[in-house]
Amino acid sequence: MTAAEIIAALRLEPLPNEGGFFRQTYVSALGLPGGRAAGTAIYFLITPDGFSALHRLRTEEIWHFYAGDVVEHLILDPATGEGRKTHLGTGFAAGQTPQLVVPGDTWQGARLADGGAWALLGCTMSPGWDAREFTLGERTGLAARFPDWAADICALTR
């Protein structure tokens, strides 16, 4: 299938600010104090133009690889000043993984590996998604804080 066919089949929509295409598939019936859902999940489709821009969430997020081409996922940790890149996919012998836990309060972004056409992923959060905890990354400040990752930061910011 093409990215456009998957977008139509799964009824995905553009994800504002971050990029890519998504649809929320789950909101826990259990509510937490303050009204926040105990958990949420989305489908998330990455295309060459629709990458996941660097952003920070206060809580942990779990990424799940479903289908398509390899995804490069970058985590930058403000507490340590270190970064790490993980490849999401099914090439286990090549070091790819189908699941990744992203710690809260870290910067994260993802894009297709070179030559990829699309990748379908899922993202799960517990406690659930809260827009008030989303911060979009700013290129200049992040590149100054993480100079070893400047090229990736440039590729993962708009």
Image (tube, helix red, strand yellow):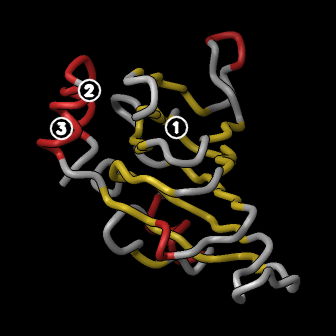
Question: Between marks 1 and 2, how big is the CA–CA gap?
Answer: 27 Å
Which is more N-terminal, label 3 or label 1? 1
Q: Is residue 125 above or below residue 102?
A: below
Q: Is residue 104 left or right of residue 19?
A: right
Looking at the image, do the residues carrying marks 1 and 3 touch, with CB atoms under 8 Å apart?
A: no
Question: Between marks 3 and 2, how big is the CA–CA gap?
Answer: 11 Å
Q: Is residue 7 above or below residue 59?
A: below
Seen from the viewer's position, the closer of residues 84 and 51 is 84
Looking at the image, do the residues carrying marks 1 and 2 touch, with CB atoms under 8 Å apart?
A: no
Coordinates of residue 17 in the picture (x, y in percent): 31, 69
Looking at the image, do the residues carrying marks 3 and 2 touch, with CB atoms under 8 Å apart?
A: no
Quarter of the image where the C terminus is located: bottom left
Q: Which residue is mark 3?
A: 154
**Which quadrant of the view contains residue 36?**
bottom right
Q: What residue appears at the point 59 percent right and 33 percent down from the top-left corner?
A: 88
Q: Which residue is mark 1?
A: 69
Quarter of the image where the N terminus is located: bottom right
Secondary structure type for disc 2:
loop
Three-letter code, disc 2: Phe
Q: What residue appears at the point 71 percent right and 35 percent down from the top-left corner?
A: 98
